[in-house]
Amino acid sequence: MTRVVVDTSVLAAVAFGEPAGEEWIQRLEGATVFAPALLQYELQSVARKKCRQQPRRSAEIVAALALALDPRRGITWVDPDPADVVLVANETGLTTYDASYLCLAATLGADLVTADRALAAAVDPFTGFTG
């Protein structure tokens, strides 16, 4: 079974029905999904922004957030070592937020699944695996 680490760009597309969401669902099908707890807060921030942009859809957006973060959805929450995150961020030039996903994927030997171009570009040079 494939092990993957998802970031906010992917989970937000899936949770909020964004155009690329279906592609990501197919990519994640059958995979064991991991993420740092940070993703929960980042996804809440995305939901807040969507609610502000589309106030009439706030209830729907909040419901989609709750569903995406429901413990029964199968995401295994694992935080990378904080010192490793700082070292990876310094080495790659990524934010510590993005470095958390990269570091976790490297630690778990998992693929990193992201729509973030800067984060995806850091995958190969840093870890040697493709996301």
Image (cartoon, helix red, strand yellow):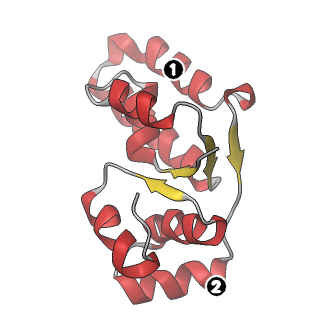
Q: Residue at x 36, y 73 (%)?
A: 124
- Observer able to see residue 103: yes
Measured from the top left, where is residue 13 in percent x and y? 37, 32
Disc 1 residue crowd, few under 14, some 14–19, many 20+, Cα 10 Å: some
Looking at the image, the residue that sits furthest to the front is 1
- Observer able to see residue 48: no
Q: Which residue is mark 1?
A: 64
Tell me the quadrant of the picture where the C terminus can be found.
bottom left
SS category of the residue bearing label 1: helix
Above/below status of 65 relative to 96: above
The number of numbered discs placed on residues in the rendered structure image is 2
Q: Residue at x 45, y 20 (%)?
A: 61
Distance (Cα) linking label 1 and label 2: 33 Å
**Pointer 1 or 2: first along the chain:** 1
Instruction: Depth check: give the residue in front, 87 or 57.
Output: 87
Q: Which residue is mark 2?
A: 83
Give the residue type that dot 2 points to. Ala
SS category of the residue bearing label 2: helix
- The tag on residue 124 is none
Instruction: Depth check: give the residue in front, 97 or 59.
Output: 97
Q: Residue at x 54, y 83 (%)?
A: 86
Residue 1 placement: quadrant: top right
Residue 25 placement: quadrant: top left
Give the residue type that dot 1 points to. Ala
Disc 2 residue crowd, few under 14, some 14–19, many 20+, Cα 10 Å: few
Residue 33 placement: quadrant: top right
Measured from the top left, where is residue 6 in percent x and y? 50, 48
Above/below status of 52 relative to 130: above
Measured from the top left, where is residue 79 in percent x and y? 69, 63
Measured from the top left, where is residue 94 in percent x and y? 37, 75
Q: Residue at x 48, y 65 (%)?
A: 97
Q: Does residue 107 appear to the left or right of 123 in the view shown?
A: right
